[in-house]
Each structure stands twice: as structure tokens, then as C-alpha cells.
Amino acid sequence: MERSRALEIVEKQLTEKRYTHTLGVSEAAVELAGRYGADIYKAELAAIFHDYAKFRPKEEMKQILIDEREDERLLTFHHELWHAPAGAVLVRKEAGIEDEDILSAIRWHTTGKPGMTLLEKIIYLADYIEPGRAFPGVEEVRAIAKQSLNAAVLAAVKNSILFLMSKKQPVFPVTMDTYNDLIQNGDDV
């Protein structure tokens, strides 16, 4: 699928602010893919579609999670996590994207997962460091991303966990598993 067609499809699903965010994620993903040797086309498409389901009704996303037999624990956590796995399903059905690498990167961009692929790490990190983001710690992670993908993903996961803990919010177990996996198996963290 051509970039322009992908953007046309996605723009109809997003608010103007979220579309601008998506453009930033795409820019960051392309840069990271070039730096770390990932498929730039797949990185760009995954980035463009990563928030495809962000504004779908909660009930629709919930039903997708149930129908697709997603981790049932998701249903007990904040619905903000639902758009990633629901989005992967909807991107396949509605946009015709069949590439499992792209769909998996969309699927895991909010929680991460142990054993993330290169593309999954790039989309997770691009979503975190895209140029429009401005929050404590993002500049540090951007700097780390220029030196080490694994270390930058670890820093982003750690910051996300600490943020949730500071707000007395639960941390999805797979995100904790992602942190542990990066600590135990990261080549350069």
C-alpha cells in the first residue's frame, strides 16, 4: 500500500491532533528503521496504522478482544490499552493489511511484550519519542535512541511503569514482563 493511500485511510479514523501524532510516529519510525536496519516500508505502514482504532467505541473494541480471544486480563485494565490489539484486527479487515510483522507491531505498541521483534521495538519506541511528545524523560529517551534501540525501549518501558505507579494505576502484567525480558535478555541495555 502506498503511503498516501495509508494516510488517507487513517486520517478518516483520527482527530486532527491524533493524525498529527501519527505523522510524527511515522517520521520517528522511518528514522529508527533506517538507523537500526529494519524494513523502512513496514515501519512506516505500522506507524501510520498504529492508532487506527483509537477512537472506536469501547464496546466495539471490547467485543473484538473477546472474539479474538485476546488476553482476558486486558478487559480489567484501562480501555486505553484496547486500541492496539483491536486495531491490528481492524487494520487487517478494513485496510487489507495482511503482513503479520506490521500487524504485530500495531498489536504490541502499547504494552510491549517479551521477545519483541525489531519492528515491534521500533513502533513502540517511535510512539513514545515522536517529535510532538513533550513530557518528563522523553528527551533522555530520544538521546538514548540514537545510541541503542534496546536501551531506549527499556527506558521508555521503565518510564511508563514508573508513571503509572506514581498515579497509583495498575501496570499490565505483560508490560512488566517486557521490562523483565529487556533487563534479562537485552543485548545492550
Image: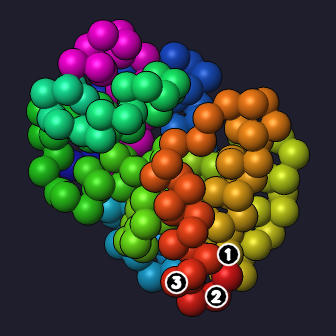
Q: CA distance from mark 3 to mark 2?
A: 9 Å
Quick check: 56 above or below 174? above
Residue beneath the point at 64% across and 88% down: 188
Residue 142 lies left or right of residue 185; in this view the side is: right
State yes or no: residue 49 in magenta.
yes
**In-image side of 19 versus 183 (left or right):** left
Q: Which badge, 1 or 3, comes first in the chain's sequence?
A: 1
Is label 3 in a helix, a strand or a loop?
helix
Residue holding disc 2:
188
- Residue drawn at point x = 35 percent, y = 10 percent: 57
Q: Nearer the viewer, mark 1 or mark 3?
A: 3
Magenta-colored stretch includes residue 171: no
Per the rendered image, the range of residues in magenta is 46-63
Label 2, label 1: how far apart the Cα atoms are: 6 Å
- Residue type, numbered disc 3: Asn
Q: Amino acid at mark 1?
A: Ala
Query: Disc 1 marks which residue?
Result: 151
Is 177 above or below relative to 186? above
